Amino acid sequence: MNSLLEYRGNVEYSAPDHCVHGKIIGISALVTYEGVDISSLEEAFKDSVDDYIEFCEEKGIAPEKEYSGRFQIRTMPEIHKFYADYAAVKGEKLNTVVSRALVNFCFWE
């Protein structure tokens, strides 16, 4: 059983324990929750998020943001050259060209 809750968490069912449990998606901090039914799972999830935010405030650290918008990829040199040349011809940055390509791929597939 997999699902996403409102705050972006994954949910899995543990047959031996007869419970559902999960982790918040998109942050490296280990924030987990569990319950015996959907209602208790949702409540535990929200409590875990609140506890995480409170912990961060107490420690004087900022809660992790889900994504920075930056990631590194590895590709074939020919692909790198093609997009770098294309960006140069268009007078754009390589990041702009690749970002636009990713957006077009995501929305047109």
Image (tube, rainbow, N blue to C red):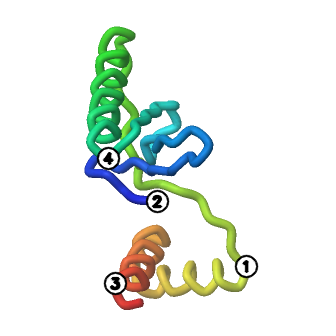
Pointer 4: residues within 10 angstroms few (<14), some, or many (20+)? Answer: few
Distance from disc 1 to disc 3, alpha carbons, whole Å, reads 24 Å
Which three-letter amino acid code belongs to the residue tagged 2?
Answer: Asn
Name the one closer to the observer, 95 or 15: 15
Distance from disc 2 to disc 4, alpha carbons, whole Å, reads 12 Å
Q: Which residue is mark 3?
A: 107
Tell me the element at label 1. Answer: loop
The quadrant in which residue 83 appears is: bottom right
Q: Which mark is residue 38?
A: 4
Distance from disc 4 to disc 1, alpha carbons, whole Å, reads 45 Å
Pointer 1: residues within 10 angstroms few (<14), some, or many (20+)? Answer: few
- Which callout, 1 or 3, points to the residue nearer the camera? 3
Whether label 4 touches label 1, CB < 8 Å: no
Q: Residue furthest toward the top?
A: 58
Name which residue lies at 36% across and 18% down.
56
Tell me the element at label 4. Answer: helix
Q: Which residue is mark 1?
A: 76
- Which callout, 3 or 4, points to the residue nearer the camera? 4
Q: Which mark is residue 17?
A: none
Give the mark nearest the N terminus, 2 or 1: 2
Q: Which residue is mark 2?
A: 2
